[in-house]
Image (cartoon, rainbow, N blue to C red):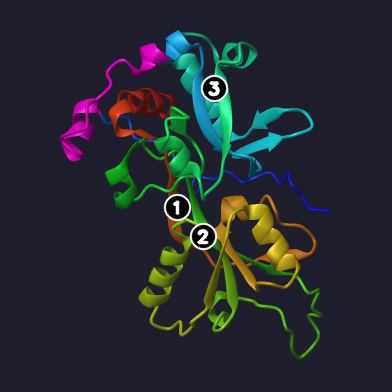
């Protein structure tokens, strides 16, 4: 049975609090397209509506997870959403939960940007890695969490006393192997960049893109791919006695909240919560 709730070890190397200063609206607007008209009243609009609309993933235990049986959202990112709403409405995070001041929309790696751009949500808190390219499209908060790309393979139950094994032990054994990555994620590029940087690694894998983590997990179990490459914080929620997360770690992934550029003042509120 899949282990869906594995407690993440939140250590100094993984959990990153933001610095004491947050980006101001002027700083954001000066670094982005000059024709973007900043909506100074975004928080007033949220108050008038009566709730904050937030896009979160449904399938990342301990970060953002939706339990269909209980109808509850849990995880670090959902807590950030409730605390942001509490800041906007002037209540406690507990009151924000009880008063239903956050309306969540489930998003995936493949559609999270589209959902944000459509105006369906006010902000996105969905293991969204901060990159320069993404800053060109959206206003992005300080980092609230840092993970690293890791590798998951099948655990073949190898005998430590045997002379050989078919299991994959490290990134060095991935030449010609099929690696599953999330569609529209930075994983494939980060993987290739890491290989090119490490001159000692002579591997040329084949990448296969999938829409969701459940599908990636099933592809590994069914033998359609040899490896899943995704953030360790995500892999940990799917690790069980049939799989193994390798020791390799590369390409730090700093997560940030994203909003439309015209709604940049909302980032100031989120940064205050992160701080």
N-terminal label among 2 and 3: 3
Q: Is residue 104 magenta?
A: no
N-terminal label among 1 and 2: 2
Which mark, residue 196? none
What is the x, y in percent for residue 247? 59, 67
Q: CA distance from mark 2 to mark 3?
A: 28 Å
Q: Which residue is mark 2?
A: 149
Q: Element at badge 3? A: helix
Tell me if residue 81 comes above or below residue 214 in the rendering. Answer: above
- Can residue 15 be spotted in the picture? no
- Left or right: 267, with 77 as reference point: left
Tell me if residue 7 comes above or below residue 77 in the rendering. Answer: below
Q: CA distance from mark 1 to mark 3?
A: 23 Å
- Left or right: 255, with 233 as reference point: left
Q: Which residue is mark 1?
A: 253
Furthest residue to the bottom? Answer: 163
What's drawn in magenta, residue-wise? 24-45
Tell me if residue 171 comes above or below residue 261 in the rendering. Answer: below
Q: Which residue is mark 3?
A: 82
N-terminal label among 1 and 3: 3
């Amino acid at each position: 049975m899949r282990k869906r709730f594995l407690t993440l070890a939140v250590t100094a190397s993984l959990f990153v609090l933001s610095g004491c200063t947050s980006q101001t609206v002027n700083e954001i607007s000066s670094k982005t397209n000059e024709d973007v008209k900043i909506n100074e009243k975004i928080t007033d609009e949220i108050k008038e509506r009566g709730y904050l609309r937030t896009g979160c993933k449904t399938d990342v235990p301990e970060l953002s997870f939706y339990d269909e049986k209980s109808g509850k959202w849990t995880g670090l990112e959902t807590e950030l959403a409730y605390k942001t709403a509490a800041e906007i409405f002037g209540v406690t995070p507990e009151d924000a939960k009880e008063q239903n001041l956050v309306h969540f929309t489930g998003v995936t790696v493949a559609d999270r940007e589209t959902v944000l751009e459509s105006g369906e949500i006010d902000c996105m808190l969905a293991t969204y890695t901060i990159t320069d390219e993404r800053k060109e499209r959206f206003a992005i908060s300080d980092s609230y969490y840092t993970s690293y790309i890791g590798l998951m393979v099948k655990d073949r139950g190898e005998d430590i006393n045997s002379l050989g094994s078919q299991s994959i032990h490290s990134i060095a054994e991935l030449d010609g192997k099929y690696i599953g990555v999330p569609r529209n994620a930075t994983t494939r590029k980060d993987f290739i960049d890491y290989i090119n940087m490490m001159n000692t690694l002579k591997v040329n894998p084949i990448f296969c893109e999938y829409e969701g983590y459940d599908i990636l997990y099933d592809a590994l179990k069914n033998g359609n791919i040899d490896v899943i490459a995704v953030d360790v914080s995500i892999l940990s929620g799917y690790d069980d006695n049939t799989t193994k997360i390798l020791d390799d770690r590369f390409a730090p992934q700093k997560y940030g909240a994203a909003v439309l550029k015209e709604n940049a003042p909302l980032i100031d509120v989120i940064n205050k919560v992160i701080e």
